[in-house]
Image (tube, coloured by chain):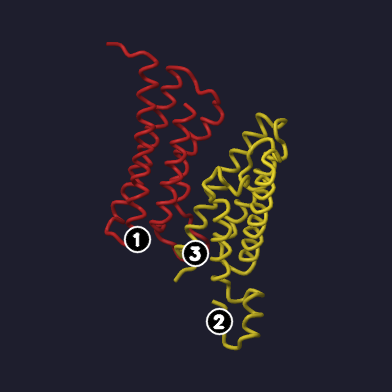
Chain colours: A yellow, B red
Amino acid sequence: MNALASTGRQVLVAVYAVFALAAGARSVVQLATRADTAPLAYSLSLVAALVYLVATLALRRTGPTAYRVALGAVGFELVGVLVVGTLTALDGEFFPDQTVWSAYGVGYGFVPLVLPVAGLWWLLRHRPADSPVSRSSSRRRPGASGR
Amino acid sequence: MRRGPADIVAAVDVVIWAATGLMAALASVCVLAALGLPLERAARIGVEIAEGLLLLVVGADLLAWAAGDGPDDPVTHVGYAVAAVAVLPLLTRRPTVEDEPDPGPPSVWVLAVAAVAVAVVLWRLGATS
């Protein structure tokens, strides 16, 4: 089956694209119209948007390089949502305004928290055959395909 | 009887909320099709019809804006208007990748994601009117 046509990849790309668009448009408008209110929060939303964009583009492609980029972007996203979510849960006044990752993405129905977990799960189940992770797995388990 | 700007704005609000409901219904049809019910053809046709309807809804919204009071936050409102017409084509048309076979039509799960996203955008469009 064509790897680009797999349903899981398609759905991940679609959701990441929606979030890249939503977070990007929101942060650009906020930074352009009221950057002084909460520059750190709005900049963080812009970073989140860029991470979503990188993940979207990397997930669209097959091959070991795209795989590593996607893994890095989705991993960064998971760390980001956990760190920012925890900081905002501990201190509600930590950021003067909401970011995409505030309170673990409550403003977006917790999708920002679920998405990187789903993305990592999918990526780890669909390693390209010649990725370093697959090669090391194959060395440990002769005959393993890495799939 | 001549309609005033307030009537036009109120009518367009109803149109936006109705469109939000229709997109939510379309998302449900897409999910049911993805789960195996024989609704895939209806889902795909529904998405194509929705693309045209969304242009009309956003056009009506701009008309109401021209006829009456503008939204409190015009930049955000325009952003939602653009997203309302752009999300479906962006998510449901996949460019072919060089040296790779035609990926074919998108999964109905993708149509469901797109329909949910548009429903949320329309809801925000109505809320920012």
The amino acid type of the residue labelled 1 equals: Leu
Q: Give the residue pinned by disc 2.
A: A145
| Residues packed near mark 1 inside 10 Å, few (<14), some (14 to 19) or many (20 plus) | few
**Residue B96 location in percent, x, y?**
48, 58
Q: Disc 1 vs disc 2: Cβ atoms closer than 8 Å?
A: no
The amino acid type of the residue labelled 3 equals: Leu
Residue A4's disc is: 3
Picture quadrant where residue A131 is located: bottom right
Q: Give the residue pinned by disc 1.
A: B35
Real-space CA distance between mark 2 and mark 3, rounded to the nearest whole angstrom: 19 Å
Q: Nearer the viewer, mark 2 or mark 3?
A: 2
Q: Quadrant of the C terminus of chain A?
A: bottom right
Q: Does label 2 lie on the same chain as label 1?
A: no
Q: Which residue occupies the foreground of this view, B76 or A57?
A: B76
Residue at 36% over, 55% down: B31
Residue B101's disc is: none
Q: Does label 3 lie on the same chain as label 1?
A: no
Count of residue discs? 3
Say which chain tag 1 marks.
Answer: B
- In the image, taking residue B15 as reference, residue A41 lies left or right, namely right
